[in-house]
Amino acid sequence: MICRYGVISGRVQGVGFRYFVRQCANEAGVGGWANNLPDGCVEVLLCGETTAVEQVQSQVIQGPRQARVMAAIWEERPYTETCGFSIG
């Protein structure tokens, strides 16, 4: 089990990005959250089985159709059991 924290930049606010991440996470059985940041980026925490988290990470990099991901910076975080996926 792992947790990865990421900051995603580009056209990721106002395009349903956080809801897209939640859908991908729920389908993969990954917990965590997604929040808009004041600078226009979105921060994401993904926690779960390694392969499931990595699958959601690759979907996040693609983003929904309306988004344009310019960069995604990821770092490992200590594993925390999460209950579902929330949007802030």
Image (cartoon, rainbow, N blue to C red):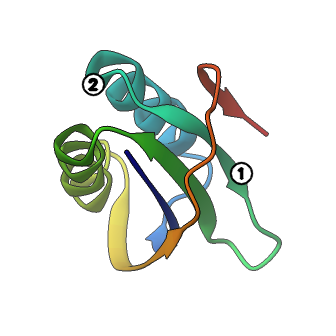
Residue drawn at x 42%, y 33% as measured from the top left: 20
Quarter location, residue 87: top right
Q: Amino acid at mark 1?
A: Asn
Using residue 61 as the reference point, say whether residue 36 is left or right of it: right
Using residue 61 as the reference point, say whether residue 34 is left or right of it: right
Q: Which numbered disc flags the more N-terminal residue, 1 or 2?
A: 2
Residue matched to label 1: 35
Please, is residue 52 above or below residue 66 in the view? above
Quarter location, residue 67: bottom left
Pick the residue in front: 59 or 81. Answer: 81
Give the percent coordinates (x, y) of residue 10.
46, 75
Residue matched to label 2: 28
Q: Secondary structure at mark 2?
A: helix
Other-residue count near label 1 (Cα within 10 Å), few / some / many at <14 / 14–19 / ≥20? some
Tell me the quadrant of the picture where the N terminus can be found. top left
Give the percent coordinates (x, y) of residue 64.
31, 42
Pick the residue in front: 71 or 3. Answer: 3
Q: Amino acid at mark 2?
A: Ala
In three-dimensional space, the C-alpha distance between marks 1 and 2, rounded to whole angstroms, equals 19 Å
Q: Secondary structure at mark 1?
A: strand
- Could you tell me if residue 26 is visible in this image? yes
Residue drawn at x 64%, y 20% as measured from the top left: 83
- Could you tell me if residue 7 is visible in this image? no
Pick the residue in front: 15 or 24. Answer: 24
Tell me the quadrant of the picture where the C terminus can be found. top right
Using residue 33 as the reference point, say whether residue 72 is left or right of it: left
- Give the foreground label among 1 and 2: 2
Other-residue count near label 2 (Cα within 10 Å), few / some / many at <14 / 14–19 / ≥20? some
Residue drawn at x 52%, y 30% as measured from the top left: 19
Residue drawn at x 71%, y 51% as measured from the top left: 35
